[in-house]
Structure formats: C-alpha cells, structure tokens
Image (cartoon, grey):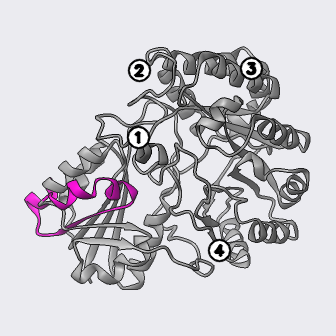
Amino acid sequence: MSKVVVINVRDRVTHPSHPIPPADLGYLVKYLKRMNYSVTFLDLIEGDEKFNLVKRIKASHFIIKPGIKSFPFCEKLAAEIKGEKKAKVIFVGPVAKVFLRRLVKNKNIDSIAYGEYEFVLPRLLKNTPKIINAPLRKDISSIGTFDRSIFHKNYFIWYPTKKVRRKKFGFILFSRGCPHSCYFCSEVERASIGKVVRSRDAHDVIKEIKYLKSLGVNTVYFFDDNFLVDKKNAEELLELLSKNNFNIEFVCQTRPDYINERVAKKLRRAGFSTVCLGIESFSDRSLYNMNKGIDSKTCKRAVKILKRFKFRVVIFLIIGTPNETILDVKKTFNTTLKLKPDLIQVSFFTPLPGSPIFEKLKIGPLKEWGIHDNIPINLSKIPTEILPMIQRLFYLKFYLLSSAFFRLILDTPIFLLNAKIYLILIKEFLNFLLGR
C-alpha cells in the first residue's frame, strides 16, 4: 500500500485567528483512502518545529497546501524532501495556482493541482501530470462530508454563542461558490472556489449533523463563504433543522442583503444562535469602491433584524479601502458602536492574488501578504502607518470602553467553561495590541 503525506501549512499571523479545518484536504484524504492509499495528515503553522516530523516519514507522495505567507517556507520544505527522498512533491490549492509559473520552473515540485483538485488528484496520483487544472464539479449534492478522522480536536471558533456549556465544535461545508464580485475577495482566503453556486443535499447534511451529535458535538459552524447564497436549498435545510431537536447551536456567515425578518425567523427556529455578517463598511462610498453591491442602509437593517431576534452578531469590517478617508472610517466605527454587535473583526483592504482588484491593477509580486496584520499595498487616502493604529484603537474602544465590555462580562460563565480556548484568544489579542 502506497503512503501519502498530506500537509496543510497555515500562515503565521499576529492577529488572533481560529483554526478552521481545510475542507478540500479533508475530501482529498477521503478519496485517497477510497483508493487504498495510506494517508498521514499534518496541519501545521509556518516554522512549526513539527516540520521535523516530515523528514522522518517515508512516503511515495508529499502533497503540500501552502498559505499565501507561508509559500516561501513550503518551497524550502519541498527542497528538503527532494534532497532526502525519492518521493514526489505536489503543491495544491489556490495559492499554488497563484504561483503557478514559479512552481513550474521549480525542479523540486513534480506537480501543481488547483481547481477542485480533491476529487481528481487521487486517481491521477500514479501518473501525475505536471499541471492539474481540475474543473468545478457541477453537482456536489452527494459528495458527503470530508474525512474527519484526520482533524485534531483543537479546531474551534471564538464567535460568541448563547448556551452556558463546555463547547465541542463541529464544522460543515454546505455550499460552494459565490456569485458576487467584491474587489477584495480571493480564493486564497475563501472556504471554496468558483462563482457558480452548488449545494449539498439537505438530507445528507442532516445525517452529518446526527453523526456529529453522536460524537458529542454541541456547536456547529457552517463555514460556507455565504451560507444563504443558495436560497432554495438553504431554506430546505433550515426547515429540516427546525423539525429536529438537536440541542446544537449553529453558527454561519452571510451577507447583509440575504437577511430579512422571514429568514431570521427560519434561522432562529432552526437553532442558529450566531450570525456573522460581511459588512465591511458603513460608508456608502467605501462600499461602492469595494464593489460590494449593497449600501449602508442594507447593512444597518440586517444587524438590527438579527439583534431583534436575539442573535449573537459578528461583524467583519475592512479599513483602508480604495480612496477611503478618515471620515469614512469614522462613520463605520461610530455606526458599529451604535448597533452594538457582539464581536467585530477589523481587516485591512488587501489586493490578494486572484481578487478582482489585483487583476484590475495588475499588481506584481509583493514581499508581504496579509489582511489582518500587515499592509502590503495601501490604496486609501489614509497614511499607511496610521491604519494599524486605527485598527488597534477601535478594538480597544469597542471591547474595553463600550457596552461590548459588559456583554463580555455577562458571558463569564461560558468563558470559564471554555477557558482553554479563550485564554488562547486573550493571549493572542494582548500580544497583537502590544505589537508583539
């Protein structure tokens, strides 16, 4: 039996971030096992000492999924593998696609696979072509869940929920694809690829939830790019969830323009406690310059509806958008404080490879990439050195000097029961604020 090592290399960042299972690699492992390959999975952070394990593993193939910041490190890892072993090295995923020309010239890389490669690569492994541009599957209704046995128990989310209990997390990818064209969006950061929306069978997802419940899971995060994007199938799933008493808290993310009172009622009846919204900005000018396709009125209405139905609300914000001014940012922050969400996340507008703005501006290679902790290129009218200060000051004002602080105090019982993960958050957050 041939042995395959699958390695996910996450970027090392200073901004607090929670680890989400790489669904594409989960499906890859699932199909590799079906073809009787022995699989070892490693989920590591750039520079992790555990990379020494790689040198000791004997395998016929090493499949590496690099992050945008960890890519140079992954190239060095490939060179080390090739220097000591006769194994084949394959780079996979959106970042591999971004650096395709560079990888084709790299003698240590035998193959590059991107697109929905996880369904194609396993049957091509014995005779792998140099480039595999896998097409999107037209139908994903019957693909089932990804292989969960490879994912360690340390995957979690920090998004606030309601019930006072020790959390055990489960993760589900219900849909793939997003039809929108926000200038900043890139497959490098997304949970799936493509603009064509496809969904799994709702009944199949219910079976998966029953399985997760049997494992003791009580908090499930749907980490789709937009959980509500396929309205018909999403509402079918919500209806099925409302008919089952899972006693599970569900969390999802979506866009503000998908939220209305009818949808909020369905989400509440289905057992959702938390909704994360890609607001990005409460400035109409900034929203327009990001090609978000919505206005600030829609954003505010979505938050108010969710708050009215007693959801925990998480808001994703972006600063440093094209031609943005201090006044635009001030409007966003003041509106956020008035709306009183439960948690915020502030990113920098970053023209990541593969994003519409990257293609439009024809930006060349940069030394640094990141959306939370560095600014590789500044398209706003705000000085680059000021943007990190604005980000940190707003975090401080929101979490320590606003009503959010008192909401956090009320959640103390939840924090105490889940001290292990929240201590990680507190440590990372303090280090981030202090610039460590």
Alpha carbon of mark 1 to alpha carbon of mark 4: how far? 36 Å
Considering the numbered disc 2 on the image, is that residue within a helix, a strand or a loop? loop
Label 3 amino acid? Asn
Residue 135 figure quarter: bottom left
Alpha carbon of mark 4 to alpha carbon of mark 2: how far? 42 Å
**Which of label 1 and label 4 is nearer to you?**
1
Taking the spot 77% from the left edge, 24% from the top edge, the residue there is 335
Residue 307 figure quarter: top right
Q: Position of residue 63 (x, y in %)?
A: 29, 65
Seen in the image, is 139 located left or right of residue 256? left
- Residue 200 is labelled as 4
Alpha carbon of mark 3 to alpha carbon of mark 1: how far? 31 Å
Q: Which residues are magenta?
A: 80-106
Seen in the image, is 358 located left or right of residue 368? right
Considering the numbered disc 1 on the image, is that residue within a helix, a strand or a loop? helix
Residue 419 appears in the picture as rendered: no
User: Considering only order in the chain, which callout, 2 or 4, is on the residue closer to the N terminus?
Assistant: 4
- Residue 334 is labelled as 3
Alpha carbon of mark 2 to alpha carbon of mark 3: how far? 28 Å
